[in-house]
Image (cartoon, rainbow, N blue to C red):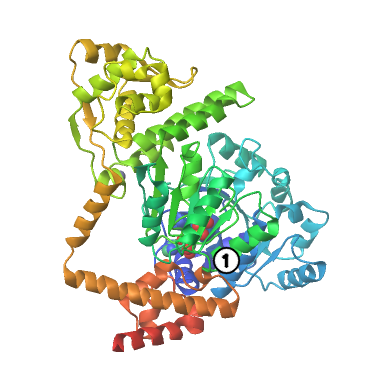
Amino acid sequence: MFVGKICRGKRMNLDNAKLALKRYFGYDQFRPLQADIIRAIFSGRDALVLMPTGGGKSVCFQIPAVTLPGTCIVVSPLISLMKDQVEGLRANGIAAAFINSAIDSREQLRVEESFYAGELHLLYVSPEKLVSGNFVSILKRGKINLFAIDEAHCISAWGHDFRPEYTQMGMLKQHFPKVPVVALTATADKLTRKDIVDQLKLEEPEIFIASFDRPNLSLEVRPGQQRLQQIEDFVRKHPKQAGIIYTLSRKATEDIADKLKQKGFKAEAYHAGLSPDRRSKIQDHFINDNLQIVCATVAFGMGIDKSNVRWVIHYNLPKNLEGYYQEIGRAGRDGAKADTLLFYSFADVSMLRDILQNGENAAQNEIQLVKLERMQQYAESLACRRRILLAYFSENLSENCGNCDICRNPPQSMDGTVIAQKALSAVYRLNEQVPMGMLIDVLRGSARREIKQLGYDTIKTYGAGRDFSQWDWQHYLMQLINLGYLEVAYDAANVLRLTSASQDVLFKNRSVELIKPTSYKERQEEEKASAKIKAPTQLKKERLRDELFEHLRQIRKEIAQKEGIPPYLIFSDATLEEMAFSKPQTEDDMLAVSGVGEKKLVQFGYRFIKAIRNYEKK
Ligand code: ADP
Ligand code: ZN
């Protein structure tokens, strides 16, 4: 076997790895853990790597693949991504190919030949192919430097993406005992981790767990009021930037897409009810920057690697923080700034509770409900959201993040005793028989027929809360629930009930502190005011930079169309932003831009240099 030789070769040097990172990918530095992982692989050790989506897992096996003699075999279940990944590598001057059910046998033979001839740095293989018939004998005819098992959580029956073929991959260690195996995943709890190590028969693997923080993602939660209007404003503030809007229903995806189309945006609905043909068309348009917005049920996003998704909106509250984090994680994979927005409404919580409560498996329902509660706590949080989010994933952030709505606009408290008294007294007089919506109507003195019929207009607190909007009341009532002054009877049509603490407010004059709600309108005014603070020269500079960025984006798109690959594979948004900022005008300048490697400099660099020079002359 050949691996021992590799480990002793001078090519295993980490300096070499750094050179390769610059040469092929155009990056100057390894991200945290990348260098350690590569070092472990160089020393012939097995490794298990946990990193969030966008964390930079691929580089961990791609650098050994290009620096060690032989080929790295990458096993990945995401067949739809293989073509993209291989094209991305080739654009960087790395020899790569794939074998899966999408290619015919002639093509497969061709790929096998180049593998035998040692021409490939990386060979991507689907798990089905890997475990099929004679594939091991094919592998044995070539020279392999590393096995990379991507999406390794698929090995575990506990995981959410279980693939039976993955359980047979322990055979790799039997057939190739000296080739290191690196398993990579973005999601693996302790049980799954153990499963991965056991089933792949990893030998004393080094385990690397990266931080799951994605600091470039901004976090924001807003009350779910006038959502369509808010979305429209949001999208206007993100001109030409690709984004995804997640909803819980197919109908909502279509309604939102229609509304946005009417307003002149390029938007499409995407859900499981569409034909596969239509879905793949939408996906292609989105990937190629021809479609700005996809309104989708959760089905969208799994099979795409588009690194320049610039924002994600949740129209509805997700069921749990795992799902939420995974979905917002589809934004900003290139590391450049990306925005996320979650709409929160009590109605969503009630609806989700109903769905989850009625699942078939009682124990499972219980777990799901607890998870929903954690989701709700996040949405209602008055402290830094990122800290809460990361704490959920057992990670401790030592400081507030500065990139969430709470950090940017710390909540202001006020004396809410009278408000609480009005609300609690109404609950009392309504005999603890009404849910939140009805309570608000009574407080605001609604003239709804139902209220008259039930005689609710005769109680003393009817109309006592006219001076607040429905949204304000919702905001206050949710706080009263969180503070323990009210309880929701989930088992009795969600009616609100008093607690022992509410007695103190009603009868013992206990004071209550509440957080001021900010309406959508107020928020807009605040934003306008803060935009004005910037000096005019600063604004002009930013505008010019944005213009140049737009221009470079356009060039990128033209090149992508000609090359027949997605624009983000030419250069990432982050790379274009840096170009727009540093305005490289020579080859050396260009090579200094993060994301510009040797091959891309030769292939595309000059077009961008020319564009920047012309732009500077203007
Ligand atoms: P993952 O597979 O973990 O989702 P990727 O490997 O696709 O992540 O990497 C995400 C993005 O980060 C890619 O655009 C990649 O080129 C970039 N990237 C990876 N490593 C580095 C690095 N050391 N410096 C700068 N960018 C990097
Ligand atoms: Zn924060």
Q: Secondary structure at mark 1?
A: helix
Q: Could you tell whether 466 is left or right of 39 in the image? A: left
Q: How many marks?
A: 1
Residue 252 drawn at (x, y percent): 53, 47
Work out whether residue 586 or residue 9 is closer to the camera in this orientation and state it: 586
Q: Which residue is mark 1?
A: 285
Query: Is residue 53 in view?
Result: no
Residue at 71%, 43% in the rendered image: 167
Tell me, yes or no, if residue 142 can be seen here: yes
Give the side of residue 533 with respect to residue 270, left or right: left
Task: State whether label 1 is within 8 Å of ligand 1.
Answer: no
Q: Position of residue 443 (x, y in %)?
A: 30, 25
Specify the quadrant that holds the N terminus. bottom right
Instruction: Where is residue 387? Give x, y as percent.
Output: 34, 40
Residue at (33, 20) in percent of width and height: 457
- Graded by Cα atoms within 10 Å as few (under 14), some (14 to 19) or many (20 or more), the crowding at tag 1 reads some
Q: Is residue 421 above or below residue 93?
A: above
Give, as a three-letter code, the residue at label 1: His
Choose top left, top right, bottom left or bottom right for residue 464. top left
Quadrant for ligand 2 reads top left
Q: Is residue 498 left or right of residue 181?
A: left
Could you tell me which residue is drawn at 55 percent across and 70 percent down?
566
| Image quadrant where one finds the C terminus | bottom left
Instruction: Report x, y in % for residue 465.
Output: 26, 27
